[in-house]
Image (spheres, grey):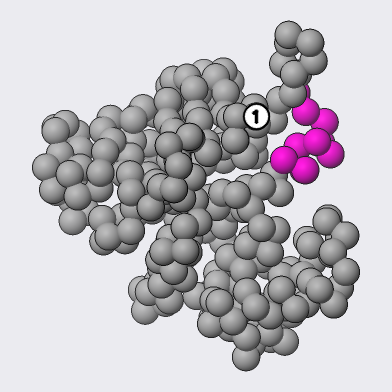
Amino acid sequence: MATTSMPLLTVERLSKSFGAHQVLKSIDMTVAAGDVTCIVGPSGSGKSTLLRCLNYLEVPSSGAVFLEGEPVGLRWKGEKLYRMSFNELSMQRQRMGMVFQGFHLFPHKTALENVIEAPVVVKGVPKAQAIEEAMRLLDKVGLSERAHYYPAQLSGGQQQRVAIARSLAMQPALMLFDEPTSALDPELVGEVLAVMRQLAEEGMTMVVVTHEMAFARDVADHLVFMDGGVIVEAGPPRTVLGNPQHARTRAFLARVQ
């Protein structure tokens, strides 16, 4: 639950177009520190594009994103904003962990090696310290006994949990999840959601694009329903899911709940 009234993340009039196709249309959103925000909606509604704009994996066409008051992907020079250099953006992205639909683990490295890679290479953490922290994180996601397994030796759910541990190893202020269970067999979904529930209980700020409505209802502090590149409806999840005010929200929920 939220621990402060000051937004950790602020999105202002964010738009994104690919050629003539406008995917996001003037999105406004805030996320308080410690909150879990779940974003739901039909395919093609702009959910994943919004998430990728939050850490500048996609460059917004207009509008801005602020993390702890600082513009994401941009820096002030005098009274004007300029695009950050690659190194500056890489430093800023360390504060935002991202877990994708695919696991994107290094196939030639063990689970442990995947988790320590960024702290050692990017942050310069001593290897022994990184290993100690990585083992703690692998234990947190229930995989300490498989620390020396390669991705090919792990199930999809286990690989996704390693990916979560890898993101947490950078000690981010914010975790972004892009449909983290969509590539998993149904019986493996629960183990990933259990880790995410634990993170929520511990106060990790998260923005989650998901189709898992039960997770959104039980874990989220705020639910956002998107369609056609706009936020159609937003509010407490039990209110939006239980008593949607917009006809488009009602039609969507009738198909997925």
**Residue in front for this viewpoint, 143 or 200:** 200
- Asked if one can make out residue 78 in the rendered structure from this viewpoint, the answer is yes
- Residue 81, relative to residue 243: is it above or below? above
Looking at the image, residue 182 lies above or below residue 79: below
Q: Seen from this angle, which residue lies furthest top? A: 79
Query: Mark 1 — residue?
Result: 70
| Residue sitting at x 77%, y 43% | 91
Numbered range of the magenta stretch: 83-92
Residue pictured at 33% horizontal, 58% vertical: 219
Picture coordinates of residue 135 (x, y %)?
A: 68, 80
* 190 drawn magenta: no
Residue 128 appears left or right of 177? right
Quadrant occupied by the C terminus: bottom left
Foreground: 103 or 168?
168
Please give the name of the residue rendered at 41% of the width and 64% of the height, measured from the top-left corner. Answer: 201
> Can the viewer see residue 163?
no
> What amino acid type should be assigned to the residue bearing mark 1?
Glu
Q: Quadrant of residue 187?
A: bottom left
- Residue 239: percent from left, percent from top: 17, 44
